Amino acid sequence: MNSMLFFDYETTGLVPARERPTQFACVRTDMNLDIVGRSTTLYCKPVPDHLFDPGASLATGITPQTCAEAGLPELQFVRDVYRELGTPGTIGAGYNSVAFDDEVTRFMLWRNLMDPYEREWKNDCSRWDVMMVVRATYALRPDTMEWPREDDGRVSFALDRLSSANQLLHESAHDALSDVYATIALARLVMERQPRLYAHCLAMRNKNLAMQEMDLERRQPFIHVGYGAAATAGVRIMLPLAAHPTNRNEVIAWDLAHDPRELLDMDAETARKRLFTRVKDRPEGFRRLPLDSIAANQSPAVFANLDVVSGQRAADLGLDVDAAMENAATMARVLQAVSVDRLLQVVFARDSLDGEADAEVALYAGLLGGTDRRTLDQLRTLDPRELRAARPEFDDSRLTTLWLRYKARHFPDALSPRERDKWEEHRFDKLVRGTDGSRTVAMVREDVVRYRRALMASSDLTDPGDLQLLDDVLAHANGIAAEIDPYETVAQPQPDPAPALATVSPLPVQPDMFGGAGDAAMSPRRRAIARRA
């Protein structure tokens, strides 16, 4: 029997591939959204090769010290989270969870040598995103609830603002458990007022049903409610064209608000530029190609029945259904004239990740082979005393890096002297040099200064607790700096002359006892050896 596990993470920052969870909370309900069992809240201890974003701590109120005192070691934390999400029949649900919380889970499992995808499908488990049904509700049935607005007039889908506008209990935004209860309340509101829409969106957690709604074989138009097309509340009439060349869960579709005849003379290079050029690099007059890849395994809001958008709502949104049908007929002729399938195969072929990309963020560089998966399963069963003697051989080079860091974080006594050197080099490269875009000690210091200035300059009364939060994050970064870079080879931010900054803890500077450039001239490997001597 299915149950729903509503869950939420708070993290050290905004990029799920790089950040670490600080807090996890979950509440299990039955399919009627009635709570069953007790809520769970977990904190995760900091790891020695990662720093907190001061802005994240200001938003959540969670500091490294909070996690160190109340948290579980990451290995125990990930196992407890997996046990909740992997309980047979569990539908893991959150708010914007597909884009964020599920990614946090995947990368956390990946770096801890666990299968990053298994909990999403095994034992009748699945995942769902409440934000998708909320966006579909606004797009298709806007009278269902009150919709808060941003200053520029756009609808806000922020969980705390939706809760407030609809008198739903949400005691503390950015507290994981409070966010979970607010998500349940929002889902219940839609379920009670729009039961058919709710049921359809919930069914889309099944990727096979989502594929049927997009129906590649018949190539019929379908409705998609997504993040784009702001003028039409995210509603687009799409035409499925082809399966994604490297991901069988994705369907490439054309936005029928646009004339498809521009595909007649288009080459693959032009199409790639018009699809994948970053916003900051787009020249004046740039027009993105109206193609999108829709993932069936991300609980998309897709509808084969075009009548789900009423004539009045289409008119309100300026959605021209007749023009879309004409463009669908035109696309049929285009498909006869050119090999659009072949074009899309080239355009959407994903380049392999840079070979220098860090293994921990390279989850999507490829699936692991069966031999490597079995090796990882065996390694995770080893007694800590057996880890030092283990010499696994992996087919996938990413696992060699993950294996070393797994031991260093959780079983440091199992490291050989050479492995200790490599671990210390990794910490120095990541937290001092900022390799692969990592957050560094210097960045944390600069951000703390910047946030303190902003708080003191604000017309609102400054909360001393916020200043203490910043001091705590700074103290954590300084403590790690004292371990990995005791002679301050990193550049420090310029001190702020404002008196309000006098309370900032002084940055630790140790004298150069060796004269000259001293330790700054040492290689990271020699520094690591010197610290252990």
Image: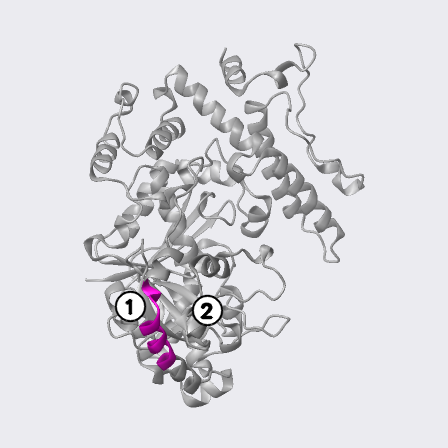
Q: Position of residue 252 (x, y in %)?
A: 36, 64
Label the magenta part by its dominant secondary structure: helix
The structure residue drawn at horizontal position 73% and vertical position 47%, both measured from the top left corner, is: 453
Magenta residue check for 335: yes
The amino acid at mark 1 is Ala
Name the residue tied to disc 2: 290
Q: Give the range drawn in magenta.
A: 328-341
Q: Name the residue under label 1.
A: 210
Residue 118 in view: yes
Image-based side of 348 in relation to 476, left or right = left
In which quarter of the view is residue 130 placed? Answer: bottom left
Question: Around disc 2, counting alpha carbons within 10 Å, would you say few (fewer than 14), some (14 to 19), or many (20 or more)?
Answer: some
Which callout, 2 or 1, points at the residue further toward the start of the chain?
1
| Crowdedness near tag 1: few (<14), some (14–19) or many (≥20) residues, C-alpha within 10 Å | many
Q: Can residue 193 be seen in this view?
A: no
The x, y position of residue 515, in whole percent, is 69, 10
